Image: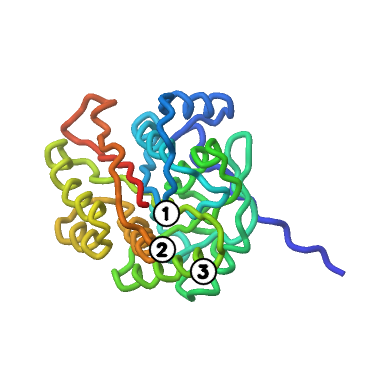
């Protein structure tokens, strides 16, 4: 009898850079950013949340997650900034470490997704250094999530986004329990505030209209540097198939709000799809 292979452990790659590495400090920062007014949480199918350093985008993420009922299991879709690994890379087993805690990988749900479509592959390489999924995990843990399915996505044609979203919807529907989709994305990168705001408004209009193909075409045709266009498109496809009827913008801002430099900003938006 041979020993089973060790369970994969994904260790933090950007703790101490994008967010505090000390568990107490991290929790304090999230608590500080989270509104204390106790607005009623709503059930949601998907959330769109930014992934910059917490000093820039943490408040947008915190305000967005604070408005949503976070289930025990969350699927996180993030863009692949490093080009490592497969195009639709799922971490299908193991544990995801954050400072002071761990989230389990929901192997059952991940396996269900892999069985639904050969587009998705079990690939840890894409996740090793990627920050876009990592920065979401502490917020989810703070609000009570127990397990995640991380999916790291390279650029895809729209037709593959549609197929991926359909497979996600089937996997979630067949799971028979509440599962939240989180699409990780920043908006326009390194343009003036006026230019970024104008371009991001075009993209946000498509999200608010629940139009995944319209969003994809708008971002491509208008050359909007929204890094999470693929995660957001796929999440919208899936959410609509699961019954989404509305989208709400919780907050839009940009890095200039913190830095004071409005000549070159990065835009951040938090949205809820329900």
Say which of marks 1 and 3 sits in front.
Answer: 1
Q: Nearer the viewer, residue 69 or 23?
A: 69
Say which of marks 2 and 3 sits in front.
Answer: 2
Residue 160: which quarter of the image? Answer: bottom left
Q: CA distance from mark 1 to mark 3?
A: 23 Å
Crowd rating for badge 1 (residues with CA inside 10 Å; few <14, some 14–19, many 20+): many
Residue 57 percent across, percent down from the top left: 35, 35
Q: Nearer the viewer, residue 268 or 240?
A: 240
Q: As drawn, is 1 to the left or to the right of 232?
A: right
Q: Look at the picture and state if 68 lies above or below 122.
A: above
Q: Are marks 1 and 2 in contact (CB under 8 Å)?
A: yes
Q: Are marks 1 and 3 in contact (CB under 8 Å)?
A: no
Q: Earlier in the sequence, mark 2 or mark 3?
A: 3
Residue 107 percent across, percent down from the top left: 62, 61
Q: As drawn, is 98 to the left or to the right of 198?
A: right
Q: Earlier in the sequence, mark 1 or mark 2?
A: 1
Residue 190 percent across, percent down from the top left: 22, 41
- What quarter of the picture does the N terminus occupy? bottom right
Q: CA distance from mark 2 to mark 3?
A: 23 Å
Secondary structure under tag 3 reads strand
Residue for point 34% across, 32% down: 56
Q: Look at the picture and state if 161 lies above or below 181.
A: below
Residue for point 51% across, 42% down: 140
Residue 232 percent across, percent down from the top left: 34, 56
Q: Which mark is residue 121?
A: 3
Q: Look at the picture and state if 67 lies above or below 238.
A: above
Residue that badge 2 annotates: 242
Residue that badge 1 annotates: 45
Residue for point 38% across, 73% down: 163
């Amino acid at each position: 009898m041979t020993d089973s292979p060790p369970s994969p452990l994904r260790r933090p790659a950007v703790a101490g850079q994008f967010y505090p590495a000390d568990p107490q400090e991290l929790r304090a920062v999230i608590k500080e950013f989270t509104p204390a007014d106790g607005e009623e949480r709503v059930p949601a199918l998907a959330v769109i949340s930014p992934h910059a350093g917490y000093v820039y985008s943490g408040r947008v993420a915190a305000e967005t997650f604070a408005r949503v009922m976070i289930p025990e299991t969350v699927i996180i879709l993030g863009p692949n900034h490093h080009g490592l690994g497969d195009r639709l890379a799922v971490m299908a087993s193991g544990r995801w470490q954050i400072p002071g805690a761990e989230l389990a990988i929901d192997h059952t749900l991940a396996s269900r997704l892999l069985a639904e479509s050969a587009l998705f592959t079990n690939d840890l390489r894409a996740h090793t250094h990627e920050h876009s999924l990592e920065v979401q995990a502490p917020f989810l843990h703070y609000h009570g999530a127990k397990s995640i399915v991380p999916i790291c996505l390279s650029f895809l044609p729209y037709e593959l986004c549609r197929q991926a979203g359909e497979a996600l919807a089937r996997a979630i529907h067949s799971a028979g329990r509440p599962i939240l989709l989180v699409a990780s994305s920043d908006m326009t990168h390194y343009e003036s505030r006026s230019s970024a705001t104008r371009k991001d408004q075009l993209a946000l209009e498509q999200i608010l209209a629940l139009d995944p193909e319209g969003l994809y075409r708008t971002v491509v045709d208008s050359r909007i540097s929204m890094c999470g266009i693929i995660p957001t498109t796929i999440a919208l496809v899936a959410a609509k198939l699961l019954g989404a009827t509305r989208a709400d913008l919780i907050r839009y801002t940009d890095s200039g709000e913190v830095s004071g430099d409005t000549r070159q900003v990065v835009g951040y938006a938090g949205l809820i799809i329900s």
